[in-house]
Amino acid sequence: MTIRMIVDGRCLQDPNYAIRGVGQHVRALLRYRHRQPMGSSWHLTAVLDRELPPLSRADEELFDQLRMTAYLPSAQRSVFLSTSPMTHSPLPLARLLMRPDIPRAAIVYDFIPHDMPQQYLSSQKARISYTTCLTWLRRFDHYFPISHYTSTRLQELLNVDSRRCTVTGVSVRESLLPANGTMTPPDGFVLVVGGGDPRKNPEVAIAAHGGSSRLAAAGIRLLIAGAYPEDMQRSLRGLHERAGGRPELLQFLPKLSDEELRACYTAAVCTVAPSRIEGFSIPIVEATANGCPVLASNCAAQAELLDDPKDLFDPDDSATLRRRIEAVALNPPERERVRRVQADTWRRFTEKEVGRRFWGAMLDLAAVPAPAVLRGNRPRIAFLSPLPPAPSGVADYSFATLGPLAARADVEVFSDTPDARVPEGARLVGEPSALAHLHPRFDAVVSVIGNSPFHLKEFDLLMRYGSAAIAHDARMLDFYCDVLSAERASAVASDELGRSVQQEDLNRWMQDPCTLEALFLKEIAEAAHPLIVHSPISAQYVEGRYNLSCKVLPFVPYRNFAAQEISAPARSALRRRLDIPDEQLIIASFGVVDPVKAFEECVWALEMIRAWNMNARLIFVGKTRKALVKFIRKETRTIGIENYVTLYDRELSEDEYRSWLVAADVALQLRTYQLGGLSGAILDCISAALPTVANAHLAEACDAPSYVRRVPDGISAVLVAEAIASIVADGLHRNRPLKERDAVLELRNFATYVDQLLAVVGCA
């Protein structure tokens, strides 16, 4: 049996925790999963933060999968583990924390900031952040405190039942265990392992050592390991001298490898653990593992590790500590007695023992049955997208999707389009917000992402919280460069391509998409679960380039044409209203006019068709920028066909656009770039059974039927003209292939599309 576990891996990314006790504890626990008895296995997915440094290679190997968001469809059950719930914002994980079907566990270290607020929560921001984490901590089903003291505080603060707590302790790293069990004779120094945090309280050890003439006479040094800033070292040296200590007997060791630290433990006459408060005391375990006697302050977490009260002292009582250090350091029999009493302390805290306690409880938690699912309930979907009247094909596609989707699910729509419209059955809630991603009432969240400014909010929320995502565009270059920033675009492209991408690269790609090397889909693919694309070519690119999986849903025509509307009599009547002669061949190119749509090849193909004695006219059915209008006019005038080319310098109404789909004889839909790009216009032509000429890559990306004639991707006006002529020769321009069109639409329609969509987002 394989058990899926989602693990908050941010503490292993954050430099403040990755190399400290938190990171070391988490690594030890996760490593031990491979040592468990046979019978069950775990599949671990790390949830990471793209704003933090990447995991080390060694930490990556702890997991089977890495994700940048915690989104999980309701149909997928897992166990969730928070590895450091009080140090990072819980909001990116809130959807998991509010799902009743996912058992949730948290490793709990301490409540030191709560118990020492003046020192750790001095700002309002810090207090709010900590209180937020504490509030969310209540939502866990099981807790793994690292000490009985932490467990007691957890029960007191949050009224947690003790049966929901498994005290694990913290394991001593194997690199700090003595090689072959050998011990080194003491070398005349007392060791304190701490750090710059004032609660570590090195002052009491310094005062005790500095005030001991006996230790000074014997030349017993005091070594303080840990990162202490220069100003703190000066202050502590001053305290030592004022207590009567000799300066040469106090030494700071700011940076020690595990091998060096182990050597210090084995050589010290004793280790002093003077902290005022701890969640657990790693130095006690490390020292006893290396046969070094320990004297510790009597804070609760340390007191539970040492059985003999004589080995404990008040953290403010330097006199008692001085006497105990003298007794242990200067009296070998007493030192041996303490060492012998403490000899087995560390054995409860090997990686095996700690791992066994942790994974045994996790296995029990995973075995808890999920709450019963109410049969017959409709899925609840949050849908985030621009909508009409936004001038966007993606908005139109979303509108067409929502009607059939609302017939099968309860759909709440989030859109920032002014005066947004939704079809009957869907409910417009408001602008895109975290509510959609975090509220437990939604079984799935679907974000619609496109290459335009209309998708900024959807994109930002996707990056933070994750969701299922429909990527409408095969490339996101314009969005990254124009909506985000050139710096972000450069960074993303550099990561995707594995080399440095400069501004000049971006400029070249923007000017000529044929030179584009990156799709800018990696961040979206990492955040989405799943990523949904409409082109198998895009899927191959995502899976091959990013090593990330995605789902392919066939692109569906979203303009519908009844057979009567595009019948020969209806077309003739419309052409008469548009004052089009019966014998004239209308060639149309649909969509905004752009160089990437090969308008020059279209113009030259018209010139050839007319040279072959065909009475042809070319209509660009879409807005043409004024600069391009001027350019095309000049070119058509030069080659003598200006009177046979129609351009629009404005947006066309829906009625005008549909009229040309009915009235035209042949369509030209061409793309000079590839990389899996799709075309809504070619879908319109397919739906209208309009014979079309398209370059091979575009036709295959759209899975076009046979009445879309292919020309090579190296677009040639001659081959385009020949393809048009072949359509005319076959009579398709007068008798549209309605049977083939109907067969296509039988398979590619929004009812089928929505069924597939619900399946891939886990709500079939």
Image (tube, grey):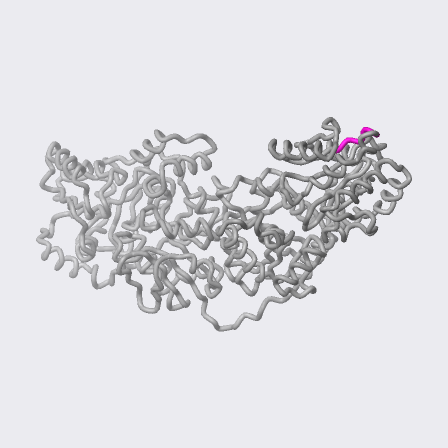
The stretch drawn in magenta includes residue 662: no
Q: Percent position (x, y) of residue 32?
A: 70, 48
Q: Percent position (x, y) of residue 609?
A: 17, 39
As drawn, is 45 to the left or to the right of 201? left
Q: Residue at x 25, y 42 (%)?
A: 723
391 lies above or below 604 = below
Most foreground residue, 251 or 575: 251
44 lies above or below 74 = above
Q: Percent position (x, y) of residue 78?
A: 58, 58
As drawn, is 697 to the left or to the right of 40? left
The answer to which quarter of the image holds residue 754 is: bottom left
Circle count: 0
Q: Residue at x 28, y 52 (%)?
A: 392
Most foreground residue, 560 or 88: 88
Q: Quadrant of the N terminus?
A: bottom right
- View extreme (right): residue: 333
675 lies above or below 731 = above
Most foreground residue, 421 or 343: 343
The answer to which quarter of the image holds residue 740 is: bottom left
Stretch of the chain drawn in magenta: 218-222
Q: Is residue 542 visible?
A: yes
